[in-house]
Amino acid sequence: MVVQIPTVIQYIGLGCSSAVIIILAILALVDISYVNRVTVRLVAGIAIADFIGHVSVILILDSKEYIGSSYCRGLAAMTTVARIMYALTNVAICYHLYRAIVYLKKSSFKYELAIWSLLMLFTGIIVVVFHFLGIFNENKDKLLCTPGSDVFAIQMVENAVAGLLNIVAVFSGIYTTYIGHRYISQWINKYSNKQMPGGNNQSNFKAKKRKTVQRSFLYPLSTTITLSSELVTCIWSLFGNPTQIIRTFNRYTTGFKGILTFIAFVVDPAVCDSLRSAYRKISLYISESKRVPDEAIELKG
């Protein structure tokens, strides 16, 4: 059995998205404050969407024998959920970054939860509509358990919705990155003036904050990279069948979703600080645990 490169990339992406989820879970268990930064919390949504997307693609590769079954319909729906979540979570991250940097407003957990609820509601509505349109059902042209329809108009609706979501996500990533860099100095000056009284420490503080904010833009930029090929495929599908080159390129880039999210995650200074703090806290806990029995033995002796 020959394993194709896009399939290998999907497995690597799955491993990377799993690593992000596990790291975030460990940080939250050690101290919930370690995942208190907006983009760090929201990237969990992208990692989950990455995970679902990679799992669905891997399962789809060997799904031909299940066409027509409820499992196949569920797999097609799972693919749709992952695509919508990935696009909308990126839009949410861009919205929170824009709101924080341009309008200098800090989002609370309740506010983020409300945004998340709206995203999940919107995702659910699209999936339900697609279900009743028969996009997850069997059709004569379906070779694998992917979303699609024999009816041309319905297939165009599916392509148009996917393309629209990708356009919004890509545009949000580019626009937020551009505007964010224009307002970044204003945000840093106001933030640092509140946190630091002045002097050399303030200069170091500003430099560190600038680096942190700039790295935050890697999240929407990574999504922009991976969604661009999918966007081209969706638009091309509205006017005809995409070429084999376009389809192959799309297969490669979709596999990089989890990989790029992981790269943006591990180079995020806030994540690095949280990991160091968690390591110190765990090390201190272990050393304290070892010290207690030793002290008890000394007292007993």
Image: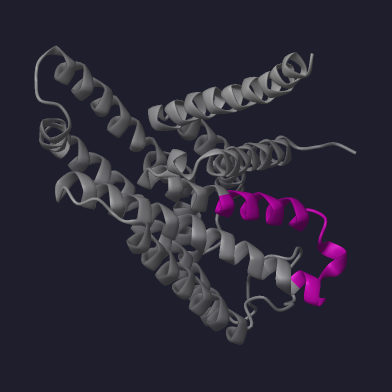
Q: Quadrant of the N terminus?
A: top right
Q: Residue furthest bottom?
A: 132
Visible in this render: residue 176? yes
Identify the residue at horizontal 51%, vertical 48% (top origin): 44
Q: Main secondary structure of the magenta part?
A: helix
Magenta residue check for 222: no
Q: Is residue 100 left or right of residue 45?
A: left
Identify the residue at horizontal 29%, vertical 52% (top origin): 96
Residue 140 at what x, y percent from top left? 75, 76
User: Which residues lie in the magenta part?
Assistant: 48-72
Visible in this render: residue 141? no
Query: Considering only vertical position in the picture, is 181 above or below 99?
Result: above
Q: Residue furthest right?
A: 1
Number of marks: 0
Identify the residue at horizontal 46%, vertical 33% (top origin): 264
Residue 24 at what x, y percent from top left? 55, 41
